[in-house]
Amino acid sequence: MSTSALPSRESDFPGWYVEVVKRAELAEHGPARGSMIMRPHGYAIWELTQRALDDRFKATGHENVYFPLLIPMSLLAKEADHVEGFEPQVAVVTRGGGEELDEPLAIRPSSESIIWNTYRRWVQSYRDLPLLYNQWANVMRWELRPRLFLRTTEFLWQEGHTAHATSHEAMTEALRMLEVYREVAEEVLAIPVLPGRKSPGERFPGAVETFTIEGLMRDGKALQCGTSHFLGQNFGRAYDVTFLDADGQTEHAWGTSWGFSARMVGATIMAHGDDAGLRLPPAVAPIQVAVVPIYRSDEERQAVLGVAESLRADLAAAGVRVRLDDRDQHRPGYKFAEWELKGVPVRIEIGPRDVQAGRVIVASRLGGDRQEVALADIVSGMPDRLADIQSALFGDALAFRDANTHEIASFESFAEGLNERGGFWTGPWCANADCEAEISAKTKATIRLLPIEPREPGSACMHCGRPGVETATWARAY
């Protein structure tokens, strides 16, 4: 672990972010351009996020499946908007086994094509519906400006793909899964998010409607944290997924897809980290409590480690993810700094005098405060302590977002405010694609979301002056 200070989050956010990712041993660049190696600490955060999502998927009736990584290009090409939207990012295999392939194979950028081509065989009657499936997988998208966790050529995610008998069922599903994403973002990762619709220009290729949750990072930029798509019958028609309805009429299936990726590890860093490193929400902290014994002699070591190991075992038995740091090659100060950098929510310090007094020192990563606590009260009080940290991290991030969310009074003040402080900016928009493109060209901001239920703003578009049709929230984004 490097002992030099991290770059300042305030003055060099990109440099701070990269250094935190590397020094906290979350990830590093892979040998291929745009690739990433996830280290144990980073992958463990993703595993805990995964578990939170998967439990909720299964509680809402979904089952996990797995489809092939390689997709014949002819399948990808069947839905015109879908292939056109992904074409710049698709990696294609043209040679295998020492020979040119008869048909090129796309490395999946998303799995709608291969899954809907398969659904054609699985669906004949309305009785076969709904299909409620999810896939945990890796995908590949050729990124021009890769960033660790946020945009890498290959990344981990889940992708849900469902088929339904009616438009209403599909729309209900898309919104239900958006709510699952909101719950995991806010209640597990402690990141406050705004739910909404994407503008037509920002929709997922092939979708009728795209719903999103958007978070605000500490540099004032937005991050798309998860999306859920109402596909209408577009993929049902493209891949000829038909069924006989209750009246014996042939219908095309209605669909949804939805995805939440490991970029949310990056979101957690950017939403909560400080100049000392990570501040992890206890719900996804691989180590929730680090116990650091302090001693000078072998006699003290034996006495302190005996109590520390007993405390570790009791915390583990109570369901706390705990690590006893009994490494002799590092001094206590080094260990304190390492666990602080890695975002461990609670550190317990215990030395010879603490053993004699039946107490420990408890340090919170959130505020840095240190308290003397009776050894007998540590285990019983730890769930509430961790819950308080989880809640406080969410509250801190929410206060930051609220302080950086603005109403647009004029285009000039909006453009100036974006340059000065970033943040979310909400105001009337005419719903014209050309106007949207002009605003983006002038400000480098995009529409992050529109209200889920369309709402007329009651005033003229903040840019062109035409009648306002939508209330749009803008931001510069990752």
Image: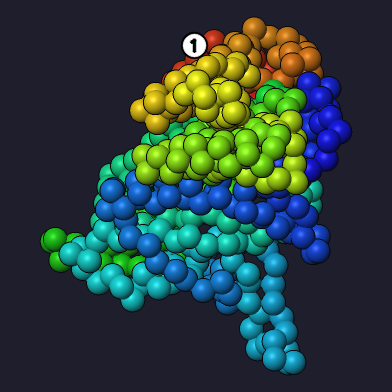
Q: Position of residue 421 (x, y in %)?
A: 74, 16
Q: Secondary structure at mark 1?
A: loop
Can residue 430 be seen at all in this image of the molecule? no
Q: Quadrant of residue 222?
A: top right
In this rendering, the answer to whether 416 lies above or below 325 is above
Q: Position of residue 196 (x, y in %)?
A: 47, 31
Closest to the observer, 136 or 116? 136
Q: Position of residue 180 (x, y in %)?
A: 39, 40
Q: Quadrant of residue 263?
A: top right
Quarter of the rendering occupied by the C terminus: top right
Coloration mode: rainbow
Closest to the observer, 329 or 92? 329
The residue sitting at the top extreme is 409
Q: Position of residue 13 (x, y in %)?
A: 78, 29
The residue sitting at the left extreme is 247
Q: Residue at x 73, y 9 (%)?
A: 413
Question: As shown in the figure, which amino acid type bears the numbered disc 1?
Answer: Gly
Q: Residue at x 40, y 40 (%)?
A: 314
For mark 1, what is the residue? 458
Q: Residue at x 75, y 37 (%)?
A: 331
- Graded by Cα atoms within 10 Å as few (under 14), some (14 to 19) or many (20 or more), the crowding at tag 1 reads few
The number of numbered badges drawn on the structure is 1
Left or right for 347, reference 329: left
Can residue 414 be seen at all in this image of the molecule? yes
Quarter of the rendering occupied by the N terminus: top right
Q: Quadrant of residue 255?
A: bottom left
Closest to the observer, 276 or 122? 276
Q: Residue at x 48, y 60 (%)?
A: 136
Left or right for 334, reference 406: right
Left or right for 228, reference 247: right
The residue sitting at the front extreme is 299
